[in-house]
Every structure is written in C-alpha cells, then in structure tokens.
Amino acid sequence: MSDADLEEIRKGRLAQLQQQQQNHQAGGGSAAGGQDEERKQQEAEARASILSQILQPEAADRLGRIRLVKGSRATDVENRLIMLARSGQLRAKVTEDQLKDLLGAVAENSDRDGASGGKIVVSRRKGGWDDDDDLLDL
C-alpha cells in the first residue's frame, strides 16, 4: 500500500468517527429519554414489589384482571393500597374481599367526581321510521 492509500483510509476513518460523535451528541436528548424510561421502569418495579408484599395472591390476580379491563381503576386502587401501606394502616395482607370493598370505594369516588365515562346513553328518535309505513306504499 502506498502512502496515498493509507492517507485516504485515515481520512475516511476520521470522517466516520466524526459522524459517530455528532450522532452521539445529537442523541443526547434521547439519552435523557432513556434515563426517564429507566426511572419509570424502576418505579414500576418498586410498585410491583410493594404490591406483592401487601396483597394475597387471589387479590393480586383480581387486580391484574381489573387492569386488563380498566387500567385507570386498577392504578387508582394500587395508589390507594400503596398509600395505606406506607402510612402503616395495613396490618395484614389484603384479601380479595377487602380488595372488593376498596374497589367499591374507588368506584363511588370516581362516580361522585363526575367521571361517569362508563355509562352509555342511547337516545332513540321518536316518530321515526316504522315498519307499518312500508305497507302504505302498496
């Protein structure tokens, strides 16, 4: 290899390294996003750990099924359970019946707050089409 070939390879490698450095610096914002994501994952693991300590297996299963249907309700119940555990108001593991009572209380609170997004109202037109109208056309 001649000196010209080696110089060309060095220039190409230098350009490649500079490009990687620029991409890394531009990706600094995504690194902060990665830290946020990592923090959220740690918080989720901490929540799961606390819940596994304060819930009986049957209650944890029920809470998991509730999360599948209505995630916001499950999150509200989890927040309340964690708050009770941190304040020392839970003396034993939460049973499924206690979880049902807590669910009822959370449901009443959300209904009282006006968050009745679960209700469906059907309004029917009055004096609209009728099957008998087809017979008049004959």
Image (cartoon, helix red, strand yellow):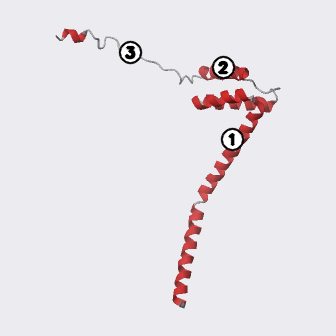
Where residue 109 appears, as percent x and y from the top left, is: 64, 22
Disc 1 secondary structure class: helix
The quadrant of the picture occupied by the N terminus is bottom right
Classify residue 116 by image quadrant: top right
Classify residue 80 by image quadrant: top right
Q: Is residue 123 above or below residue 75?
A: above
Where residue 131 appears, as percent x and y from the top left, is: 28, 11
Q: Is residue 135 left or right of residue 93?
A: left
Q: Residues within 10 Å of mark 1 (few under 14, many from 20)?
A: few
Residue at 57%, 68% (x, y): give it.
Answer: 20
Q: How many marks?
A: 3
| Cα–Cα gap, marks 1 and 2 | 25 Å
Mark 3 = which residue? 124
Using the image, tell me which numbered label, if any, was put on residue 44.
Answer: 1
Q: Is residue 88 left or right of residue 14?
A: right
Q: Residues within 10 Å of mark 3 (few under 14, many from 20)?
A: few
Residue at 68%, 47% (x, y): give it.
Answer: 39
What's under tag 2, amino acid-wise?
Gly
Earlier residue among tags 3 and 2: 2
Using the image, tell me which numbered label, if any, was put on residue 34.
Answer: none
| Cα–Cα gap, marks 3 and 2 | 32 Å
